[in-house]
Image (spheres, grey):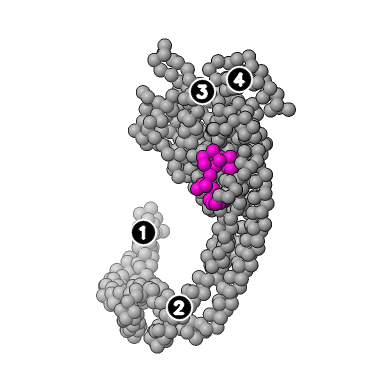
Amino acid sequence: MLARLSIRDIVLIERLDIDFAKGLAVLTGETGAGKSILLDAFSLALGGRGDASLVRHGVEQGQVTAAFDLPKKHPAFAILRENGFDDPESGEMILRRVQLADGRTRGFLNDQPVSVQTLKAIGATLVEIHGQHDERALVDVATHRRLLDAFAGLEESVGSVEGLWGARKTARDALENHRAGMERAARDADYLRHASEELMKLAPEAGEETRLAERRTLMMQGEKISEDLRDALAAVAGPQSPVTSLAAAVRRLERRVSSAPKLVEDAVKAMDAALNSLADAEQNLQAAINAADYDPAELERIEERLFALRAASRKYSTPVDDLAALAEKFKADVGLIDAGADRLKVLEKEANAADAAYLDAAKKLSAARIKAADKLNKAVNAELAPLKLERAKFSTQIESEPQSPGPQGFDRVQFWVQTNPGTKPGPLMKVASGGELSRFLLALKVVLSDRGSAPTLVFDEIDTGVGGAVADAIGARLARLAEKVQVMAVTHAPQVAARADQHLLISKEALDKGKRVATRVAPLVKEHRREEIARMLAGAEITREARAAAEQLLKAATA
């Protein structure tokens, strides 16, 4: 539900904070006091169209913040997750919209920037605003179907049909892909068999070309490298090697160690280390020479393999590294030719089974909708007489088209009305007048209660042009509706205002010695409520009789 609405610098509203509670809240006031401004501001926070004219004159920007308290399973949180937001720790969701004087707007969700589209999608799950010219939801045939399903508690059945529709599509796609593959393979059967055999015989491997090319380069460079290595080995261990003379010199010096150790020992150690290093160098050089040696036959085999791989690459216009995958594809295509007929039969059987399962579930769903439509018609029609629509008739039209199936079945649902006996029934929006449309909507909302409804409903002057018993009936139904969902109503009817759990008075206040005005909203307690309802009854001058009538309305509303 809406917990708090804060408005800053929107048209005539400088600063406004309103706390809302459960139940029915009414907004009353003189014509032109700013009720429409309030709703326009609220719509802005819910992702409605922005307009530079909404910004109060003389300031650079205005903003509207709407804070909601929601249950954890509310659909708004699913939209939140789909757009990469984390669920808030509490059930609070804060929508904020900044309107700049240059026409641009910025949206925020729990103080994080968000697109207007996301704001609008979430707002649609939180609030429904209805007025004489604002019942657009009633035009959408898909909405009618959803409302009927909600009324009948068919959401689980619809979910099951959606799942079967997905399974049906998957099975159909698999069948069509396999059939297309078989047709493609059959057209190129001879070529595919030859290519598959050729590539399977070649047996290419991913990365093989790189490995072979590197080995070939190393082997071709091996001869030159070997010469340098042998020259180095000759210098270290050949006839001209210093090892023999160094060893002899070490032996001579070793014989002198006993007589002059301080003079000889360090030199002997250094020469021993040099001899050891030369020995290590000899071993390493010999190992390198052995590694550099290559088999000419191996080089020839590598070159032949590279030539074969690159020839296949050119032939099939495919990189060498992709030849292995191409070989598998050709093998699979040949398999389609050889075993495709059997697989086709299996897939056809699976697709037919998926079709049958979907059709059976869709037929059961359709039958349930037809049964629910009759109950919905009776329930709505029972609400029409008190709303002075006793001659009108509401009906739910269901057109079943099995040849045009969809995720939610094959039913087209539309709400129709007949406003008077003898007149031709037709779609709700085309047949009903503005005032009638509002009352039909209210009857629907009362019947549907909290099913298929946003947690907050706003009714904008749906009682326009009615009074007396009709206004009282509207007030009674708004109150009933408010037992299940939060209801806000902008009204000029004292009969509606008297039934409010929360009464808010919208007025204009002169500021700066009358140089400008600002819209104010004040919650009314009992005495002030009576006075406001008396004003609504009497008009310009509040009489004693009007106050008495207001008192009676308040007593009757709480009786």
Q: Which of marks 1 and 2 is nearer the N terminus?
A: 2
Q: Label 3 is placed on what type of residue?
A: Glu
How far is disc 1 from disc 4 in space, using C-alphas? 119 Å
Tell me the SS state at disc 3.
loop
Residue 181's disc is: 2
Q: Quadrant of residue 362?
A: bottom right
Q: Earlier in the sequence, mark 4 or mark 2?
A: 2
Image quarter of the C terminus: top right
Residue 270's disc is: 1
Give the residue displayed 55% in from the left and 58% down from the top: 412
Tell me the SS state at disc 2.
helix
How far is disc 1 from disc 2 in space, using C-alphas? 79 Å
Determine crowd level at label 4: few under 14, some 14-19, many 20+ residues with C-alpha closer than 10 A: many
How far is disc 4 from disc 2 in space, using C-alphas? 80 Å
Work out whether residue 325 or residue 294 is closer to the camera in this orientation and state it: 325
Circles 4 and 3, Cβ within 8 Å, touching? The answer is: no
- Vertical comparison of 301 with 444: above or below: below
Task: Give the residue number, with chain letter if any, for mark 4.
Answer: 534
Q: Quick check: can you spot residue 319?
A: yes
Residue 30's disc is: 3
Circles 3 and 1, Cβ within 8 Å, touching? The answer is: no
How far is disc 3 from disc 1 in space, using C-alphas? 112 Å
Work out whether residue 211 or residue 287 is closer to the camera in this orientation and state it: 211
Image check: 382 left or right of 190?
Answer: right
Please name which of the two marks, 1 or 2, marks the residue nearer to the observer: 2
How far is disc 2 from disc 3 in space, using C-alphas? 73 Å
Give the residue displayed 40% in from the left and 29% down from the top: 55
